[in-house]
Structure formats: C-alpha cells, structure tokens
Amino acid sequence: MKKAGACDLKTCFLCQFSIPEWIAAVSDHKQHLSYKKNEIIFQEGQPVKGIFFLYDGKVKVHKQWGTDKDLIVRFAQQGDILGHRGLGSGERLYTVSATALEDTTVCYTDLTFFEASLKVNPSLALKLMQFYADELQEAERKMRNLVHMDVKSRLADALLEIGRLHNDTQFTISRQDLASFAGTTYETIYRNLQEFIQEKLIAVDGKTIHILNEKKLKKYSG
Amino acid sequence: MKKAGACDLKTCFLCQFSIPEWIAAVSDHKQHLSYKKNEIIFQEGQPVKGIFFLYDGKVKVHKQWGTDKDLIVRFAQQGDILGHRGLGSGERLYTVSATALEDTTVCYTDLTFFEASLKVNPSLALKLMQFYADELQEAERKMRNLVHMDVKSRLADALLEIGRLHNDTQFTISRQDLASFAGTTYETIYRNLQEFIQEKLIAVDGKTIHILNEKKLKKYSG
DNA sequence: ACAAAAATATGATCTAAATCATGTTAAAAC
DNA sequence: GTTTTAACATGATTTAGATCATATTTTTGT
C-alpha cells in the first residue's frame, strides 16, 4: 500500500451522498491509497480502523477457513464500499478480508469520520442501508444455492454474475477464485468448466473465460 | 391473520428509535395483527406492502426451493423486524417467507409510512443499518460454514444459536426445521442428533432438546 | 534470468451425506 | 372423533463431489 494523489471528491459513495457543505470536511479527512495486485487491503479479524471506497481496480472480499480454504463472498469494483461490515453492533473487527485482484486505488476514511458523516448526512445512511439490504438478499440467495443447487448450477450462476459485474461476456479469473466463489474445490470447477466447454456454453483461453450462450447458462443456474 | 388490540408504542424497533414527536404518527399508522401457529405472515415473491415488528411469538424466516425444500435463514422473536429485506434497490418483492412457529402478534406499518419514518428519524435509519450489518455478517458466516464445515458441526452451531435465541439450554423445534436451518435433510439431522445423544451433549424429549454440554458443542461448531 | 512458489491439468479413490424405501406415530382438519 | 396429513424413525443404496496423487505450466520474487 502506498499513498496516491488526491481524489476527485465526486466518484465515491461517500462524496456522492454527502451534502455539499460536508465535502470540504471529506476532503480534509480522506486519503487516497493504492494497492498492488494480490496485496491485502484488510484482513478478517483485524480491528476496523476505517472504511474504503474503491476508485479503480477489482477486489475480492473473502472469508478464510484454516490456511488453505477460502470463500469469496463478493467482488468489489469502482464505486463500491469496503469494510462496512465492521459497522455492526459487535466488536469492531473486520469479518472478511479484502485482497486486490489487480492494481487498485481506494479512498480511505477513518471510522470516526465515517460515522460522523452518517450522522450529518441522513441520505448517506439511507443509501448505505439500501446497499446492505441488497447485499443481504444476495447473501441469502447464495446460501440457498449452496444448500439446494449442485456445483454445475452454482458455477453457471457464478459465471453469469461475474459477467454482469464486468459488464462483458468476457473476463479473466483464476480457477481457484472461481472455486472459492462457487463454494467448491479447484478440481470440481475444472471438470465442470470442461463440461461447459464441451456443451459450447463457454470458451476458455488461458485465464480468460468467454460466455458464449448466456441463455443456456441461465437455464443451468435455475 | 386477524386484527388485535393496539400496541404499547414502546416495544418495537420503530417506536424505540423514533423521536417522541413522531410517535403520534406511528400510533395512527400502525396496526396490531395476530397470526396462529403455522400461519404464513408473508411469502417470498409477493410484493412488499409493509414492514412487521414482532411483538410476541416466534417466526421462521425462510427461502423455499421447489415445493418441498426449504432453508431457514433466521428465527425472529420479540422486538425483531420482518420484511425489511424488501427495502433494497431492486423490485419490491419479499425475498423470503415468514411463517409463525407459534401464536404470534406483530405490529404492522405500510411501506410508505415506514420509509417516511426513516427520513424523519435519522437514528432509526442508523439503527436499522447496524441491524443489517449484523445480519449480513451472520449470513456470510453461515455461508462459509455451509461450504467448509460438515453437517455435525453445523448442527452443533445451529443448536447453540437456537439456545442463545431462546436464552435457555432447552427449547422446542421440529427436526424438519432443524434440518432446514442447518442446511441439510431430516434423515441426516436424525442421525447426528443420535450421535450427540450418545455422546451426552444433548438430551431429547419429544420435540424438546436440552443442551447438556455447551462446551463440547462449541468445540464441534469450531 | 532463474529459482521457488502458485496455479493448472487430469486420473483414481474414497466418503459424507443425499436419496430411497417402509413403517410408525403424532398432529391437524373436517 | 375419525380421517388425512405431516412429522418421525431407521435401515439400505447411491452418488456427487471431496480428497489424493502426480505431472506440467505459469507466476512472481530476487
């Protein structure tokens, strides 16, 4: 992590939903930081010092299990907020880790200032609430999928979601991360990707996956 | 469902975090309703008309899958809010169902009034936000458990959580619901309960489960 | 540029847990 | 108060997907 130039005070969640009078305060308090690919932004269990807003790049938000197992709960990109799970009523510890998937710049504000911002800007709190509601819905949908759908369906769902995120039918992701996102192992992902390739629903070139038949993938995802 | 007497304007989430000046408006808009055991309060897919606050009784919040499969995402009890997942940015449809597990009374307010309440009472919005943050953390913890822990561990976790909820080492729940909560099938729950009984971690009397050895259950739950 | 570490590829094996099957009991509903 | 329906009990069978094993390729750190 290293400090980077100042931000435009327009792009991030915090600036977008704060009243104009507050922006000066934001400008004083926020820091622009940059992370290199694979750098850890924060880690599960660490005390929450602040909140991050993603300016550029892609980040995986994940929960670790032991040393070698992982579950990716979300991919974050431009405009997204990171670290907000720490705002619950319990201890102020990050409940997830965030790792840069590519070179990334974020804007950072300490927790105290962010909480003041929430009090000063009711519409910020309201927006954040809505964002939580969306994430909660999604998390519960995923829970149901984990319990009731087989791996192939979950992989189809994961591919479609990542495509939607990138706003493209083509994207790059490691098999390992795909496994962690679909809630399974590398080997199982490997085999199911083979099947999708055979069925011509996707094409694979190195780490780049092309979605060829969205309709059929949707059928798999239920 | 039938209408019941007026509420005390003190107990529920809405009254507790609204400014005193707003309580009169709340009194005008809220309705007290009662549901019998097994009655459906609202169902996944239906349009969200309003928000519920649980006064008395217990409710399961669940997502259905096909006709006979189910996943319980949460048990709600006195003071809890229901239906708030509908506040996300998407379509206003309930993303879960809520079913009374015993005779239950709730206080109900239509969505428009609740949204006005959020705007008028910033601390209500803040509290709700915090509540979402907690639920999101919990949902993601459960997701990780579903992926990385075996059924026995998840059952231990479920039993401990239900005990915590009831604030007792003894509670009543159907095996079916236990299965839906732990993300598995009735048969598997049955066998694992047998094992816990053999190991003297729990005792079972009909549908009542006694937790005998919380410490060891915690060890299982990781 | 090169060594060390990750990630990938792919087959063989194992196992936890789902499914199936069938009988019993308990709880709603008419 | 009896019929219908749902929940419980328990063994036998199947299977999806995890784990293991090993070789190759790609990244990344120095």
Image: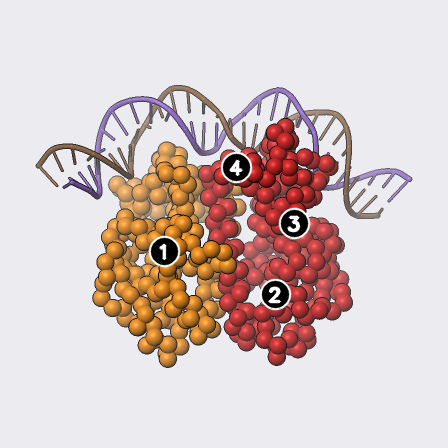
Chain colours: A red, B orange, C purple, D brown
Q: Tell me the chain of label 3.
A: A
Q: Secondary structure at mark 2?
A: helix
Residue under circle 3?
A166
Q: CA distance from mark 2 to mark 3?
A: 19 Å
Residue under circle 2?
A13
Contact? badges 1 and 3 (CB < 8 Å)? no
Q: Nearer the viewer, mark 2 or mark 3?
A: 3
Q: Residue at x 51, y 35 (%)?
A: A150
**Is circle 1 on the same chain as circle 3?**
no
Percent of width and height locating residue B138: 48, 53
**Which of disc 3 and disc 2 is earlier in sequence?**
2
Q: CA distance from mark 1 to mark 4?
A: 34 Å
Q: Is residue B163 visible?
A: no
Say which amino acid is labelled 1: Ala
Q: Is residue B92 visible?
A: yes
Q: CA distance from mark 4 to mark 2?
A: 35 Å
Residue under circle 1?
B76
Q: Nearer the viewer, residue A197 or A206?
A: A197
Q: Nearer the viewer, mark 4 or mark 2?
A: 4
